[in-house]
Image: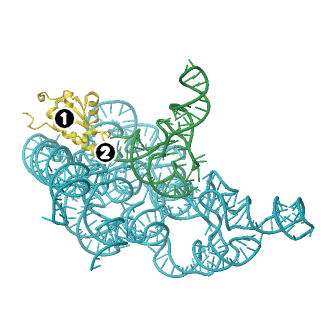
Chain colours: A yellow, B cyan, C green
Amino acid sequence: MNAAHDKKPTPGRLKRRSDFLRVQETGRKWVSQSLILQAVENGTDSLNFGLTVSKKASPSAVIRNRIRRRLRAQAIALLPVKARAGMDYVLVGRRETADKPFADIEKDLLWCLKRLDLLKKEEKS
RNA sequence: CCAGAAAGACGGAUGGCCGCUCUUUUGCGCUUUGGCGUAAAGGGGAGGAAAGUCCGGGCUUCACGGGAAUACGGUGCCGGGUAACGCCCGGGCGGAGCGAUCCGACGGACAGUGCAACAGAAAACAAACCGCCGAUCGCCUAGCAAUAGGAUCAGGUUAGGGCGAAACGGUGCGGUAAGAGCGCACCGCGGACCUGGCAACAGGGACGGCAUGGCAAACCCCACCGGAAGCAAGACCAAAUAGGGGCUGCGCAUAAGCCUGUUCCCGGCUUGUGGCCCGGGUUGGUUGCUCGAGGUGUCUGGCAACAGGCAUCCCAGAUGAAUGGCUAUCGUUCCGUCCUUCGGGGCGGGAUACAGAACCCGGCUUACAGUCUUUCUGGAUAU
RNA sequence: GCUGCCGUAGCUCAGCGGUAGAGCACUCCCUUGGUAAGGGAGAGGUCCCGGGUUCAAGUCCCGGCGGCAGCA
């Protein structure tokens, strides 16, 4: 833990529909209980992420907002520290994301990163 | 104290760590002095329904209007409020409740057209199935005959029966061959006119023997209102791409087409040619974008909705979409259990709603754990 | 955010205010050595939900719920 307690680089956000489609069509995907992770190389050094929470996850706008905020909090906290840079990540919310303990979501996100072999090299234990 | 009615308010609190967005000030950097980037500090940051998108406006565009008729859609007791409304307030009428109160698409069926299955004789200028009554010019049976029974109709009748959702006033008395508003009394109904009220309507009522059955959430009639689309409206900038237009001068014709449902009238535009120059869609960005029929307090007018004066405040502006994530303690309330000085307290467990601004307002409708305040009604107890 | 349309049998759809229907599918019987086809009989409905108008509502009116499509 030498570089982490300095300022974490804040990850960029994916905002265009075309970005999401590119990740969905060309990237890799892993499904866990509380979220789905999609990722693809973006050809730069920066790390970007986006969120997708559809009406399928929950018909209530309040619950969708809650899912999106919890995912965003996890993404900002974990991705710059644990995930490899130079990638675009898309986190897709599911119905369980609203009620699961926060630690479980963290575990699921790390699990997805591991299965896609996108953990940072120095973080491997 | 119990049960209920109405109006209104609220709809978790306080910390810790980590974040988002807008804004003000200051510092630093860049700058074409318009600003842009960055850091720190201060301040703001979801709702009563933000929801459904059911009405009404503001605003914007549709190349610019004015008038009339008609179509289509909406509203529908009366008066007031309002920018406007299908909303609100007050009143009337009808209905529910012991009551406080609540509910009501509540104009017109003598302007016209239409509808009513099944049953029933008949479903709308009434009609005659059973029945009741009458008659016998003509018929049959019994009888000397009067007459009785049947049959029939040149017939009367709607009291009673039966059908139906509904059968052309109700009850009683008289009357009659039997009956019938045929006559009378009471009730209901219509109603010239009078009184009160701005009005809806209410009270009285000469007179009328009863006319005017139901359905307009069937077509419709009457009165009033409405141009259409919507911030994904619209404006600007940049890039790349395909292919078209715009402005203006001159001229011609009175022809054709167009001017936002249709038709007509008034008024206007386009066509032909010369010159000059750009415009449109797509993607991204900027803008529209939040100071407003604004909030709060108070005074005045009004029964009230509401209006006006004064003072004071600035109160979300996101855009793959901020207004939060995690955590600790507490509150509220329910259940179980234990203790109790009957006020309550301890422990364990559960519940803590409906729901997320997307241009902005005024309403309506629908969803909602729980809590509080005020006024009123009915009942019980005590004095 | 805005604008339209739809909801009837297991499925696809009809249905002038008057007893809810058609085709396919399903069950039983006939036919056949057996099956398919064919013929006959039968079962199957909260007409999305709640109010209202009407004597009577799947149909008319109002309010909900659900689904589908379109608009940069």
Taking depth in this image into account, of B5 and B226 the one nearest to the observer is: B5
**Which residue position holds label 2?**
A60
As rendered, which of B339 and B331 lies closer to the eye?
B339
**Element marked by disc 1:** helix
Which element carries disc 2, helix, strand or loop?
loop
Give whichever of B5, C70 is nearer the camera.
B5
Q: Chain of mark 2?
A: A
Separation of marks 2 and 1 at Cα, in angstroms: 26 Å
Co-location on one chain, circles 2 and 1: yes
Label 1 chain ID: A
In this view, the mark in front (2 or 1): 1
Horizontal and vertical percent position of residue C2: 37, 47
Q: Are marks 2 and 1 in contact (CB under 8 Å)?
A: no
- The spot of residue C64 in percent (x, y) is 39, 50
| In the image: residue B210, left or right of residue B84 | right
Please give the label number shown on residue A107.
Answer: 1
Residue drawn at (32%, 40%), measured in percent from left and top?
A: A55
Q: Is residue A28 left or right of residue B138?
A: left
**2 or 1: tag closer to the N-terminus:** 2
- A2 in relation to B233, above or below: above
Q: Amino acid at mark 2?
A: Ser
Q: Residue at x 32, y 39 (%)?
A: A56
| Location of residue B123 by image quarter | bottom right
Q: Is residue C62 above or below residue A59?
A: below
Q: What residue is rendered at 13% in x and 36% in y? A: A9
